[in-house]
Amino acid sequence: MEILSIARAEKKPGKFIALFDDGTEIIVSAAQIADFGLYSGREMLDDEYAHLRNALMLSSSKARAVRILGNRNLSAREVERRLVEKGEPQEVARETVQWLENIGAINDEEYAVAIAKHYCAKGYGTARIKDELFRRGIAREMWDDALCSLDDTGEAAYDFLVKKLRGSRDKADLRRATDALCRRGFSYEEARSLISQYLERLDENEEYNQ
């Protein structure tokens, strides 16, 4: 393929449009023009042209990935999925994610710990935390380390329980509170233990106030 012309892209500062003899137009940067030795009249072999297109797709994918991340934390799987949803080829999206991991922009192990601590602090149990790790595409082999990083999985849940019951001892209220804890990812045994702790502290407070 022959490059017929290279002209500035009016609406894209710092970009140029390379026009090929088959009518194809591609947008390139000054750095890409230098890296690939592009100039008007140059004949490009098919493999050279394919290499150029792949490099351009990867460059576009990297820029898009940076925009997707912004100031947020995302897992490798989440970034790859979003890139594909935006139209990036699967292989290009995967290579982009590898680049992000290499430069430290994403780190699934650290992200898993952050997710576990966040939901623990909100009073959720192990099952719910695992659901969140799964939903965000964190590999299962990272789950245990993330859960082991938690200092106290019960204190926030106890605070949730106190706010929900507001000093009630009513059996129906206790049953509903137990069900609520189970929905938040605690086992039935864990929920009953928290209920027992709540009742014990309630007794202690009443004795202290007498």
Image (cartoon, rainbow, N blue to C red):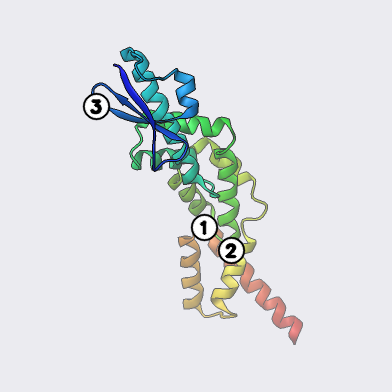
Q: Nearer the viewer, mark 2 or mark 1?
A: 2
The image's mark for residue 157 is 2
Q: Is residue 176 above or below residue 208?
A: above
* Contact flag, marks 3 and 1 (Cβ < 8 Å): no
Q: Secondary structure at mark 3?
A: loop
Mark number displayed over residue 38: none
Along the line of sight, which residue is nearer the eye, 197 or 90? 90
User: In the visual, does 118 lie left or right of 1?
Assistant: right
Which corner quadrant of the image does residue 47 belong to? top left
Instruction: Give the percent coordinates (x, y) of residue 37.
Output: 45, 17
Could you give the CA–CA distance between mark 3 and mark 1, rounded to whole angstroms?
62 Å
In the picture, measured across the screen, residue 103 lies left or right of residue 21, that is right
Please give the label number shown on residue 23.
Answer: 3
**Considering only vertical position in the picture, is 83 above or below 208?**
above
Q: Amino acid at mark 3?
A: Gly
Distance from the alpha carbon under mark 2 to that under mark 1: 9 Å
SS class of the residue under badge 1? loop
Determine whether label 2 and label 3 are within 8 Å by CB.
Answer: no
Q: Residue at x 53, y 49 (%)?
A: 72
Q: Residue at label 1?
A: 186
Q: Which residue does the image show at 60% across and 40% down from the upper left? A: 145
Q: Residues within 10 Å of mark 3 (few under 14, many from 20)?
A: few
Establish if 79 lies above or below 7.
below
